[in-house]
Amino acid sequence: MSNTTTASVSRRVAMGAGWVVAWRLATRNLGLLSTLVLVRLLQPSDFGLIALATGFIDAVDALSDICVQDALVRVPVVDRDLYDTGFGLSVLRGVLTAALIAALAWPIGDFFADRRLAVVMLALSAGILISAFENIGTVHFRRELAFRKEFDMRLRSRIASVAITIVVAVVWPSYWALVAGILVNRTARLIQSYTMSPYRPRITLRAWRRIIGFSLWTWAQAMLIQVRDRSDSVVIGRLLGATQVGIFAVGFELGTLANTEIIEPLNRALFSGFASLHASNKDLGGMFLNAVGLGLLLVLPVGMGISMVADPLVRLILGAKWVAAVPVVQIMAVAVGMTMLTSASATLLNVIGRLGPVFSVMAASTGVRVLLLLALVPTVGLPGAAAAIIAATVMDLVLFLWLTLPRIDVSLRRLGSCVLRPAIATLSMVLLLWHLGMAWTPGAGQNPVQLGLDIGIRSGLGAICYAIVLASAWILAGRPDGAERHVLSMLHGVWERLARRRR
């Protein structure tokens, strides 16, 4: 594939990531709207019942996920046998998962002494069965990097779900309104999967051997991720108590916002982009550098910015009683740059079939993470837990780059060239705010208006400094192809579309 084609795929990946981010923003806003209405119509016990039921169901659903769609995305050439086998595996998995949930419903209801829980779980198990029959042909959207279609399908389903939930809650103020919304969302996605894709699948397992190897490795990775992510709560809860678990969980979520809102959407699009280039045996190295450059251009200033304004941010969003989470936010937010590099490397290795080494690195870093948690939490507390995670992330970074860079013919010097400009701009931002006494300092004020103004001033100054230094560094470097040019190209495209609409 020529450099032009590689650049074209890179632009499509960037646009795809934009659509995934847009979906996240849309679903958060729709969820907020739904919550604001429903809290006035339903009782807290209704929300608690559904949260308990969906917690069990989501756990079983995640544990049984064998990532069939990812397997089909990475296959260079797909045929009807592969698509139909993917559909057959999805149906089989859905039937077994729904049956397991249904079998557990009454015992779980009896355990919690709430028969309503059993009935709700039975109803929601039907949703798992509905989703199992979604048209496997929609995988083509991801293979072709057509994330706009995925966005449309998900958004329409979510809007229908919110609308039905609110209508049912008005007519019948009960937890069944929430159940209805969940089932409508799954049903709407099922219907749209057949209206938006012309493919009509058949149930078969004829080509299962061509899928199951990748699926089992990704399932094993998912299980390891569950162990890794749960280890923090287990160790902190055992050594420091439930209150500290809550503080750490909230601080961790806030500190890793750049990861969940930028890196994860980018990786979803990146998987398809890597698969597209790998199918043609083309320039994966260029694609990797473009993706890392774009990701770091966005997450470095965001992560460091969250870290520097952690105190007023926590006070504004969570309240003064959560100030113990500030050190966790400050430490975790700094690590997003490393997370970008490790996640992009792991995604690429999975696409090219190096799933075993990815699992081995994850297993090793998980072990180190647990050992460091056990060593640091008793003596340092929550900052020690955050430091343990950072240390394990550094280990991930070193090992994943060691595995990845030689396979795509990328030197550390080339990697450093795409990291350098965002790093210099971020460092300049940090030095400016530090000099002004606005970095890692307590919030100026106590009420929400004062705290919001403080955050706005710090963020505004930081963003202006970052943009000026980044643009200057890019111009001085001769305006090379890279993340900056991709961003300008996307902004230009958005501006042109807005201009056409005004006419």
Image (tube, grey):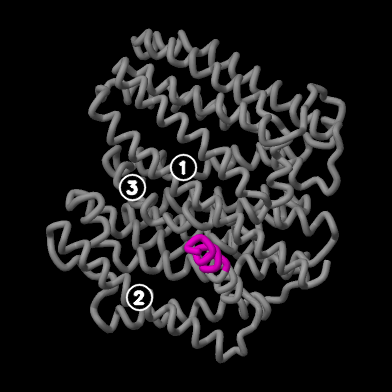
Q: Amino acid at mark 1?
A: Ser
Location of residue 143 in the rendering, given as x and y in whole percent from the top left corner: 73, 48
Q: Is residue 136 above or below residue 250?
A: above
Q: Nearer the viewer, mark 1 or mark 3?
A: 3
Helix, strand or loop for disc 2: helix
The residue where tag 2 is placed is: 462
Identify the image quadrant of residue 442: bottom left
Label tally: 3
Disc 2 to disc 3, how far (Cα)?
Answer: 25 Å
Disc 1 to disc 2, how far (Cα)?
Answer: 35 Å
Q: Is residue 294 left or right of residue 464?
A: right
Q: Amino acid at mark 3?
A: Val
What residue sits 82% from the left and 30% below the top?
Answer: 208
Disc 1 to disc 3, how far (Cα)?
Answer: 16 Å
The residue where tag 3 is placed is: 250
Which residue is nearer to you in this view: 365 or 407?
407
Residue density around tag 1, few if under 14, some if 14–19, many if 20 or more, within 10 Å: some
Residue segment shown in magenta: 493-503
Location of residue 125 in the rendering, given as x and y in whole percent from the top left corner: 53, 17
Residue density around tag 3, few if under 14, some if 14–19, many if 20 or more, within 10 Å: some
Identify the image quadrant of residue 448: bottom left
What residue sits 25% from the left and 82% below the top?
Answer: 436
Helix, strand or loop for disc 1: helix
Helix, strand or loop for disc 3: helix
Q: Is residue 37 visible?
A: yes
The residue where tag 1 is placed is: 231
Which residue is nearer to you in this view: 223 or 52?
52
Q: Is residue 231 magenta?
A: no
